[in-house]
């Protein structure tokens, strides 16, 4: 590796002003940002870190930053007195590089990200997920908060960064590369959540495993669903042929097999550019109890100027068009919409109405997760319901059915409804206003079960429906269960 001068500039503070001006000027020009040579300050950092943290220097040496002579100081330099700033070997620096710093050269990418749901990921305070991590599963013994929140939720969602009296990040908020990290300068996010430091590779961000750090598990198993899908199977079979490390990586031009998460949600096509807003091509939001259109969800979250869901769907269909005929994408969305509507109408909407009525009537108590019905309903929509909807979105049939709506139906009929009926009976026995509320909830349950979607549970299928089911069972038995006659 080349050697640089170990002598720092005479005035680090003045040098910081020059560097910032150079970065802003360079970023305003077309093409890549680069300097004719590495700054003396970054050269000094480099000489020390080759001894102290050699792997970081090696990673940086593989990066485009290295080829553009953008080093440690260009990213870590801080203004004296700024939040998180501290003196280090004669320089004023900060530990955490934020999207605000990245925006000096990557303004478009940062602006797109800041407009995305990823940028809001840390704002989960008050959610049921947060209640679980802080209260049900956690306590306040770790720096005044829950160790589970720090080690679990915030490692994906992001922490609200704090610093100690010396300007160093506190251990309850750092290390953290959560996608919605709330930084001291007011910016949201961590670019290194996807572009791991200090290589900051675009290719790495295109690999499904990068998204899988957060998008897996019982409530949002997108990585597992992808691996089950035709897309994931194709990637596994063709990972060495899709030239994932190319600067230009356009589906249908640079590769035609093995699409990854980035292919569909972020990367360029022949007709649209790269986006760092991962919601730009998503038309349903399947996070809540009842799926809603993505633009409505973004409006509720406070994102400015949300893109209409129809435009998002058209953008995703453009991605599909690189490999599939229009009729294929149209039919896929018809199937997907049908599954979302099925979940919403049969389970999500009536289930939420019954659960809300139990709470409003004082039949289930006010403390979240203190009653069995709280857990049952939460897992029904938050785990099983999401899996079914995400499975259909990504063409994972096993997650749509056996890990999805099968689990939803099992919980709905064998747990949720009996538990709700039990609470109704208990409320009626209590008498007074609680009995009146219980009767109203009981009527709602009865009406739900008597509907066309659920009357089978009461044995109220029509004669025609019963006959059709019986014929299907007989045909199945003939195919699989009847033994052929033995020869004489």
Image (cartoon, helix red, strand yellow):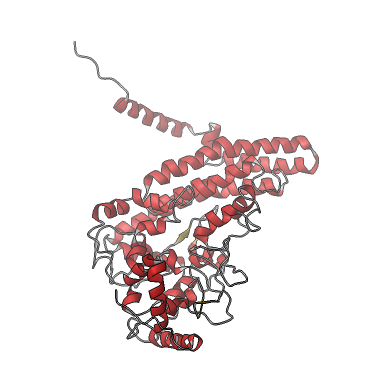
In the image, is 486 to the left or to the right of 384? left
82 vs 454: above or below: below
Q: Report the front residue among 309 and 98.
A: 98
How many marks are shown on the rendered structure? 0
Residue 212, image x, y percentages: 41, 55
Q: Report the front residue among 388 and 372.
A: 372
Residue 86, image x, y percentages: 55, 76
Quarter containing the C terminus: top left
Q: Which quadrant holds residue 434? A: top right
Q: Which residue shows up at 47% across the image and 73% down it?
A: 99
Q: Which residue shows up at 46% across the image and 71% down it?
A: 113
In the image, is 253 to the left or to the right of 337? left
Q: Extreme top residue here?
A: 488
Q: Extreme right residue here?
A: 432
446 vs 210: above or below: above
Residue 422, image x, y percentages: 66, 35
Q: Extreme left residue here?
A: 488
Q: Report the front residue among 28 and 405.
A: 28
Residue 65, image x, y percentages: 35, 76
- Residue 279 in sight in this render: no
């Amino acid at each position: 590796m080349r050697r640089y001068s170990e002598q720092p500039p005479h005035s680090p503070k003045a040098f910081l002003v020059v560097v910032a001006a150079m970065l802003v000027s360079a970023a305003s020009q077309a093409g890549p940002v680069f300097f004719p040579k590495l700054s003396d300050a970054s050269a000094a950092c480099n000489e020390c870190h080759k001894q102290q943290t050699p792997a970081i220097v090696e990673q940086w040496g593989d990066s485009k930053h290295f080829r553009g002579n953008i080093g440690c100081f260009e990213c870590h330099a801080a203004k004296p007195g700024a939040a998180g700033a501290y003196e280090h070997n004669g320089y004023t620096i900060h530990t955490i590089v934020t999207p605000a710093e990245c925006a000096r050269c990557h303004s478009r990418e940062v602006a797109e990200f800041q407009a995305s749901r990823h940028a809001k990921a840390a704002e989960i305070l008050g959610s049921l997920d947060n209640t679980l991590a802080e209260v049900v599963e956690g306590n306040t013994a770790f720096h005044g908060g829950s160790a589970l929140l720090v080690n679990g939720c915030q490692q994906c969602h992001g922490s609200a960064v704090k610093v100690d009296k010396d300007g160093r990040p506190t251990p309850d908020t750092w290390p953290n590369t959560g996608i919605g990290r709330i930084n001291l300068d007011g910016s949201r996010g961590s670019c290194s959540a996807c572009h791991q430091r200090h290589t900051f590779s675009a290719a790495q961000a295109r690999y499904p495993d990068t998204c899988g750090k957060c998008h897996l598990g019982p409530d949002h198993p997108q990585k597992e669903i992808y691996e089950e899908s035709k897309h994931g199977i194709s990637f596994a079979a063709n990972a060495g042929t899709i030239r994932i490390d190319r600067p230009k990586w356009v589906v249908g031009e640079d590769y035609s097999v093995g699409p990854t998460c980035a292919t569909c949600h972020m990367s360029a096509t022949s007709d649209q550019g790269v986006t760092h807003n991962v919601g730009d091509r998503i038309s349903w939001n399947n996070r809540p109890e009842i799926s809603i259109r993505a633009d409505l969800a973004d409006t509720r979250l406070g994102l400015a100027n949300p893109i209409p869901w129809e435009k998002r769907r058209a953008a995703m269909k453009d991605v599909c068009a690189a490999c599939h005929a229009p009729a294929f994408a149209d039919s896929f969305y018809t199937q997907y919409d049908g599954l979302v509507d099925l979940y919403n109408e049969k389970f999500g909407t009536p289930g939420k109405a019954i659960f809300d009525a139990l709470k409003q009537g004082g039949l289930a108590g006010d403390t979240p997760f203190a009653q069995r019905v709280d857990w049952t309903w939460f897992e029904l929509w938050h785990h099983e319901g999401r899996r079914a909807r995400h499975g259909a979105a990504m063409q994972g049939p096993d997650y749509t059915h056996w890990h999805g709506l099968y689990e939803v139906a099992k919980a709905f009929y064998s747990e949720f409804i009996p538990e709700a009926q039990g609470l109704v009976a208990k409320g009626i026995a209590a008498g007074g206003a609680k009995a009146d509320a219980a009767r109203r909830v009981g009527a709602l349950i009865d009406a739900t079960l008597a509907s066309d979607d659920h009357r089978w549970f009461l044995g109220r299928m029509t004669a025609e429906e019963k006959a059709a089911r019986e014929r299907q069972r007989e045909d199945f038995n003939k195919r699989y269960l009847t033994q052929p006659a033995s020869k004489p």
